[in-house]
Image: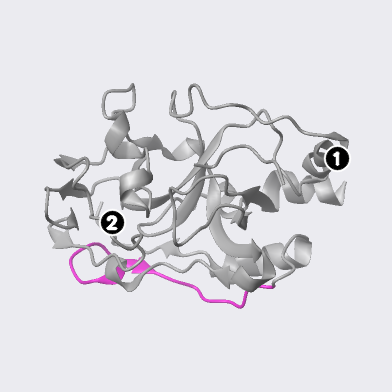
């Protein structure tokens, strides 16, 4: 029962099967996702890496991996999602009320402020393959992009779908906060400083040490505390693909 509780409400592990978030996340990484804070009304913040359910055909045509008996058991106890789940992982660039844009040859701009994006895959441009905007992010939506921009089918490539490329907040599973495996990649996934620059929108963060063994209740608590929270006054291995 404890494992089922953890899986459903607290923290869950996901595997990275693609290159769309390199070098922040590499193929084969296992990340831990905080699933608890959304239950208390916390929504994604700019700069957070989030896992979300396919909002409408983003993964159409992608193969669903078969799971063996061991993998199915691990899915049941919460160490793996089930093979039927279709989830993606991207970085939140803009949230409801933000104006976001990117012109060819230029940086991504949020509320007129240029983002310094040191997490981009070496050699990537901010958006030369698919410029966009400017447009305002609707209520209860976020705009997401991969860190490996020229190898990421993100919001830019789904502007003709029912959500116009935006991801509904209620489709967000949670925030990826830790790379837990392999051990030589053990690290947290902090929000880059560029999202705190004056004028982009106010946020506050609560810091806590993240336990490397955060696959249980004890580890879930630091994950929750470490999540960035919205401040008053802000402008406004075989796992499913989290591409």
The mark total stands at 2
Categorize mark 1 by other alpha carbons within 10 Å: few (<14), some (14-19), many (20+): some
SS of the residue at dot 2? Answer: loop
Q: Which mark is residue 73?
A: 1
Magenta residues (range): 196-211
Q: Residue at x 37, y 44 (%)?
A: 151
Magenta-colored segment: predominant secondary structure = loop
Residue 240, percent from left and from top: 63, 37
Asked if one can make out residue 186 in the rendered structure from this viewpoint, the answer is no
For residue 173, above or below residue 232: above
Q: Tell me if 87 is positioned left or right of 55 in this view.
A: right
Q: Residue at x 44, y 57 (%)?
A: 22
**Quarter occupied by residue 157:** top left
As measured in the structure, the alpha-carbon distance from the residue carrying label 1 to the one carrying label 2 is 39 Å
For residue 230, above or below residue 186: above
For residue 25, above or below residue 38: below
Q: Residue at x 67, y 41 (%)?
A: 239
Q: Residue at x 52, y 57 (%)?
A: 26
Q: Are marks 1 and 2 in contact (CB under 8 Å)?
A: no
Asked if one can make out residue 199 in the rendered structure from this viewpoint, the answer is yes
Q: Which mark is residue 124?
A: 2
Residue 231, percent from left and from top: 37, 64
Q: Tell me if 50 is positioned left or right of 114 in this view.
A: right
Residue 226, percent from left and from top: 55, 69
SS of the residue at dot 1? Answer: helix
Q: Tell me if 92 is positioned left or right of 213 in this view.
A: left
Q: Is 208 in front, or is 131?
A: 131
Q: Is 69 in front, or is 205?
A: 69
Question: Going by the picture, which residue comes out furthest to the front?
Answer: 123
**Quarter occupied by residue 241:** top right
Camera-near label (1 vs 2) is 2
């Amino acid at each position: 029962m404890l494992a089922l509780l953890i899986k459903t409400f607290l923290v869950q592990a996901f595997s990275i099967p693609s290159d769309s978030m390199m070098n922040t996340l590499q193929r084969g990484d296992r990340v831990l996702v905080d699933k608890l804070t959304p239950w208390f009304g916390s929504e994604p913040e700019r700069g957070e890496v989030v896992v979300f359910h396919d909002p409408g055909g983003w993964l159409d045509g992608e193969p669903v991996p078969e799971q063996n008996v061991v993998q199915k058991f691990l899915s049941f106890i919460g160490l793996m999602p089930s093979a039927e789940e279709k989830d993606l992982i991207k970085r939140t660039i803009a949230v409801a009320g933000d104006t976001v844009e990117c012109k060819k040859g230029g940086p991504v701009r949020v509320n007129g402020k240029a983002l310094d994006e040191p997490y981009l895959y070496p050699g990537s441009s901010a958006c030369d393959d698919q410029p966009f905007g400017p447009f305002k992010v609707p209520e209860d939506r976020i705009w997401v992009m991969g860190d490996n921009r020229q190898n990421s089918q993100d919001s830019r490539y789904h502007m003709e779908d029912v959500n116009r490329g935006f991801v509904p907040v209620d489709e967000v599973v949670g925030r990826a906060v830790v790379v837990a495996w392999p051990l030589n990649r053990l690290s947290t996934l902090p929000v880059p400083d560029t999202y705190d620059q004056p004028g982009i929108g106010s946020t506050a963060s609560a810091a806590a040490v993240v336990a490397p063994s955060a696959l249980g209740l004890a580890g879930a608590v630091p994950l929750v505390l470490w999540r960035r929270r919205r401040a008053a006054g802000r402008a406004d291995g075989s796992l499913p693909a989290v591409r």
